[in-house]
Image: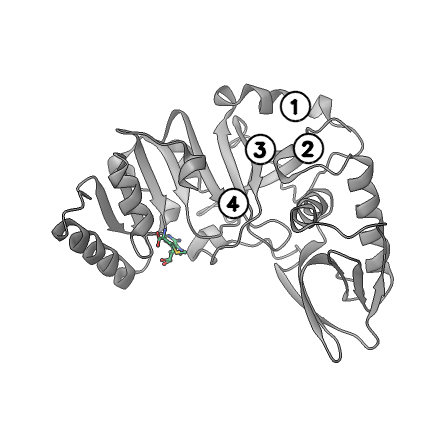
Amino acid sequence: MIEWLDVGPDLRVLEIGAGTGYNAALLAVLGCRVTSVDVSPAVVMEARASLARLAADGVDTSLGTVVHGDGYEGWPDDAPYDRVVVTCAVNGLAPSWTHQLAPRGSILVPIRHGGLSPLILVTSGAADADTAEVAGPTDMDTDTANAAGPGDTATGSTVRGRGLASAGFLPAAGPLGWQDPSSVPPFVRATAVPVTRHRLLPAALSPNALADLCFAAACLDERVTRVHIVGAPQEWGGCGVFDPDTAAAALFTHNDVILAGNPVALDVATALIGRWERLGRPKVTDWTCRFGLAGPPDAPILLAVDWACTAPS
Ligand SMILES: C[S@@+](CC[C@H](N)C(=O)[O-])C[C@H]1O[C@@H](n2cnc3c(N)ncnc32)[C@H](O)[C@@H]1O
């Protein structure tokens, strides 16, 4: 993540989720002025103690500060930031992060997507002209997604996201974890006897290709989430399709699709694999998004919307 942040001396960095303080210490040693926010007072005390121990051992962590607060608010006192790095899984961006971002700054953030939390690189339109160009509504073809689409994109209109890598993080507390009550839950459990397995691709997918498929499927269909299939004698978990009407689930694996329940979930999974194939098996990094305002009026978040594939198909 630090390599992707592309940091150097004197950059101002806001970290959301101090945890052990390790990431803040590394950034401080690299010469960044880091403000690391954590929602847990106990975690803040431990992270501060870790930085102090390092300092006592001769490691210069003087550029790192750990503060207590909800990362949803950012930390206005030290803004503007050249980089925001988020180290807990969020459902969307806090508006404060974009407000506290310096011109041409960027945000590296794991955003819930298909029940997982891949890393998304967020830039302002001006800082990522390529993305702005390809994400325009007039460029969208029939395989462009319109996932999770609360209408008002005004607040996030100059901000763009691009998929970076598959990843997993602990969920954020507070407004950053806001979930649209009408959407498919981020984690579902499906039980069925028998569970059936369906080979839909001629050859097994590599771990990276499976991650690419799952990312694309979540861009293309809101019913893609993290599913856990409870079968006998085995259980399986990962990214898949959940059909809320029938409670059926179809899990993507390297070799096949595992179906629990009504075949409608398998039909959706089959169609998604077909669309991914027709798009030329785009990678995580081939997808861009805009951001749309959602959530309660007193604590809105910016959800990733309008995923568009930029790969030549
Ligand atoms: C995986 S840890 C962070 C790891 C850390 N960057 C490190 O270097 O060790 C996730 C942290 O996010 C914090 N967290 C969760 N929700 C938060 C929020 N809304 N605001 C700030 N911190 C939050 C948790 O308390 C936890 O310490």
How many numbered markers are drawn? 4
Residue marked by disc 1: 134
Q: Are marks 2 and 1 in contact (CB under 8 Å)?
A: yes
Residue marked by disc 2: 308
Quadrant of the drawing holding the C terminus: top right
In x, y percent, where is residue 177? 49, 54
The alpha-carbon separation of the residues under discs 2 and 1 comes to: 8 Å
Q: Residue at x 70, y 29 (%)?
A: 311
The amino acid on which the numbered mark 3 sits, given as a three-letter code, is: Thr
Q: Are marks 2 and 4 in contact (CB under 8 Å)?
A: no
Q: Cβ(mark 1) to ligand 1 < 8 Å?
A: no
Numbered disc 2: secondary structure: strand
Q: Residue 255, located in which quarter of the rendered image?
A: bottom right
Q: Are marks 3 and 2 in contact (CB under 8 Å)?
A: no
The alpha-carbon separation of the residues under discs 1 and 3 comes to: 17 Å
The alpha-carbon separation of the residues under discs 2 and 4 comes to: 17 Å
Between tags 3 and 4, which lies in front?
4
First along the sequence among labels 3 and 4: 4
Q: Quadrant of ligand 1?
A: bottom left
Residue marked by disc 3: 153
The amino acid on which the numbered mark 1 sits, given as a three-letter code, is: Val
